[in-house]
Amino acid sequence: MTIQRVLHIVGKMDRAGAETMLMNLYRHIDHSQIQFDFITFTDEVGDYDAEIIALGGRIIPILADHSLARMWKLKNFLKQHPDYQVIHAHMLLNNAFHLLAAKGAGVPHRISHSHSTNNGKTNIVKKI
């Protein structure tokens, strides 16, 4: 049986709300059937990285200066790794870029998950 790998997109796996929720789920799933991998946008070590690796997950840093560059790098990564059939994005407004990259790479299951309705920004684009 093939293990289904789910790719979560987060900024960094530190002890924050969405990241802690993901770890609570990850600790209790059947790792012989499902594995979580994590795209991060830093090469700094996150609080949960060692535990993720111990549980069989992968941390994949994508480094770029802005959202469009990250989108292109993510799309290229996904094209090189067609085994990812599920992408779960947790980055608020930037989810649009990440899921567009996943769609362009042919990922059939794309989930946008907002963990907050208020990011503290007053800019009209951020509010939308």
Image (spheres, rainbow, N blue to C red):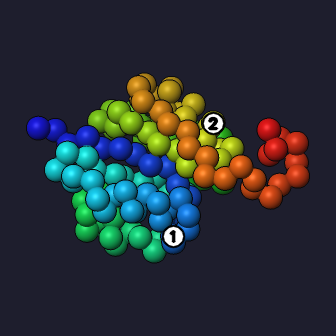
Instruction: Point out which mark residue 14 bears.
Output: 1
Q: Residues within 10 Å of mark 1 (few under 14, many from 20)?
A: some
Residue 25 visible in the current orientation: yes
SS at mark 2 in the image: helix
Q: Are marks 2 and 1 in contact (CB under 8 Å)?
A: no
Front in this rendered view, residue 40 or 68: 40
SS at mark 1 in the image: loop
Assign the N terminus to one quadrant of the image: top left
Residue 62 visible in the current orientation: no
Q: Residue at x 56, y 44 (%)?
A: 113
Q: Residue furthest left?
A: 1
State the image quarter where residue 79 is shown: top left
Question: Where residue 126 sits in the image (x, y, percent)?
Answer: 80, 45
Q: Residue at x 21, y 53 (%)?
A: 31
State the image quarter where residue 127 is shown: top right
Q: Is residue 78 left or right of residue 126?
A: left
Q: Is residue 59 above or below residue 54?
A: above
Q: Is residue 75 left or right of residue 53?
A: right
Assign the C terminus to one quadrant of the image: top right
The first of marks 2 and 1 along the sequence is 1
| Disc 2 to disc 1, C-alpha distance | 22 Å
Instruction: Point out which mark residue 96 bears.
Output: 2
Q: Mark 1 is on which residue type?
A: Asp
